[in-house]
Amino acid sequence: MKKPRAVGLIAALGLLLGGCGAKPLALEPEKLQQADGSFGLSEVSLGATVEETEKALGVSLKEPVRESSGIASYEIDGPYALDGKKLHTELEFGSAGLQMAAFYPEADEAAYEALLKQLTEAYGEPDQTIDNSGEALGGTISTRGAQWVADDTRLQLMWMNGEKIEPNLSLILGYGK
């Protein structure tokens, strides 16, 4: 009778030492284009339901953080990681299912430049770029970005920084042109 208790104790200790969560999925920017040429995630397709997304990513999407005009947005930390660092992730669902996934890596200009280089090597020159600065929110804000379009999907990289805002780096994929 002592064996089952010892096995249970070892399993519990393994969970405590190893962590209860699943290993994060590696977000590989150069692998965001599907076989049909569209942009998307290999684990879950654009158009997937909330339930299909939860199952595919091993997460629980309980309550949306925002709901407006038939769009529900969920925010989670993980399940994706970039360069070994967990990413804050936003998933947006509409009547046609998952329509956008946004990832927020560590926000610094060097990370933006590295991702831009990696995406350009993988998908060619961007279809659209943005590089501007101006006065907003009581200070100067600079915005840089690139967008690649394939069929009815897009992949967008954005960097924002300014005097009165926190630096923000985002990698977004979803429907739209």
Image: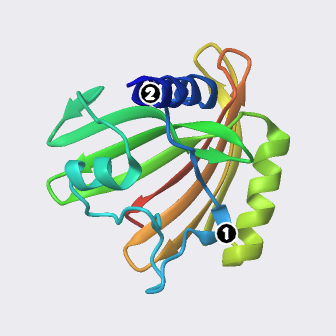
Residue closest to the far right: 110
Which mark sits nearer the N-terminus, 2 or 1?
A: 2
Left or right: 38 in relation to 65:
right
In this orientation, which residue lies closer to the viewer: 157 or 31?
Answer: 31
Disc 2 crowd, CA 10 A, few/some/many (<14, 14-19, 20+)? few
**Which quarter of the image is occupied by the N terminus?**
top left
Residue on which disc 1 sits:
30
Gap between marks 2 and 1 measured at Cα: 42 Å
What label does residue 8 carry, if any? 2
The amino acid marked with disc number 1 is Glu
Residue beneath the point at 57% across and 45% down: 24
**In-image side of 26 versus 67 (left or right):** right
Report crowding for label 1: few under 14, some 14 to 19, many 20 or more residues within 10 A (C-alpha): few
Could you tell me which quadrant the C terminus lies in? bottom left
- For this orientation, the residue located farthest to the front is 1
Q: Position of residue 112 (x, y in %)?
A: 76, 47
Q: Quadrant of residue 29?
A: bottom right
The residue at the point 71 percent across, 75 percent down is 122
Residue 162's place in the image compared with 90, above or below, is: above
Would you place residue 14 above or below residue 24 in this image?
Answer: above
The x and y percentages for residue 5 are 42, 23
Secondary structure, mark 2, is: helix
Residue at figure coordinates x 21%, y 55% from the top left: 49
